[in-house]
Amino acid sequence: MAKLSAKEIIDSLKEMTLLEIKEVVDLMKEEFGVDPSAVAVAAPVADAAGANEGPSSVDVVLASAGANKIAVIKLIKEVTGLGLGDSKAIADNGGVIKEKVATSEAEELKAKFEEAGATIELK
């Protein structure tokens, strides 16, 4: 098997859904006995220097689906392109809906989800 470069690995991760990436992380934990997400925590610290300008992109995170969960599931499915089961899992457990979107797009998504009854955080 040919050895993949770090760039090739990152490029392949860009093509995956969040749930597929979570599976990769879980397999890495199992195979190597390390938690790669713990290493990723150090990255935001390096970015803190540019924080005073305001972020140019943010993550849209579902904090709560609210009382109208079905509408929120449909909206997650529409926005992410995930299947019904994956969309329901995000609605049930919360989590990132979209990563690194422009702040204007994030505000639009937040408004749509809040209209459906969800609680959204922009991080």
Image (tube, rainbow, N blue to C red):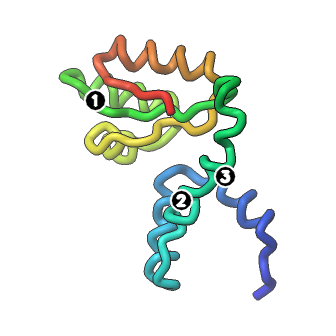
The x and y percentages for residue 55 are 65, 28
The reply to whether dot 2 and dot 3 touch (C-beta < 8 Å) is no
Compared across the picture, whether 111 is left or right of 116 comes to right
- Label 2 neighbour load within 10 Å: few <14, some 14-19, many 20+: some
Reading the image, the residue beneath label 1 is 65
- Nearer mark to the viewer, of 1 and 3: 1
Decide which of tag 2 and tag 3 comes sooner along the chain: 3
Reading the image, the residue beneath label 2 is 21
SS for tag 3?
A: loop
| Residue visible at 50% across and 20% down in the picture | 109
| Residue visible at 32% across and 46% down in the picture | 89
Residue 53, relative to residue 33: is it above or below?
Answer: above
SS for tag 2?
A: helix
Decide which of tag 2 and tag 1 comes sooner along the chain: 2
| Residue visible at 33% across and 16% down in the picture | 116
- Label 1 neighbour load within 10 Å: few <14, some 14-19, many 20+: many
Q: Nearer the viewer, residue 50 or 29?
A: 50
Q: Amino acid at mark 3?
A: Glu
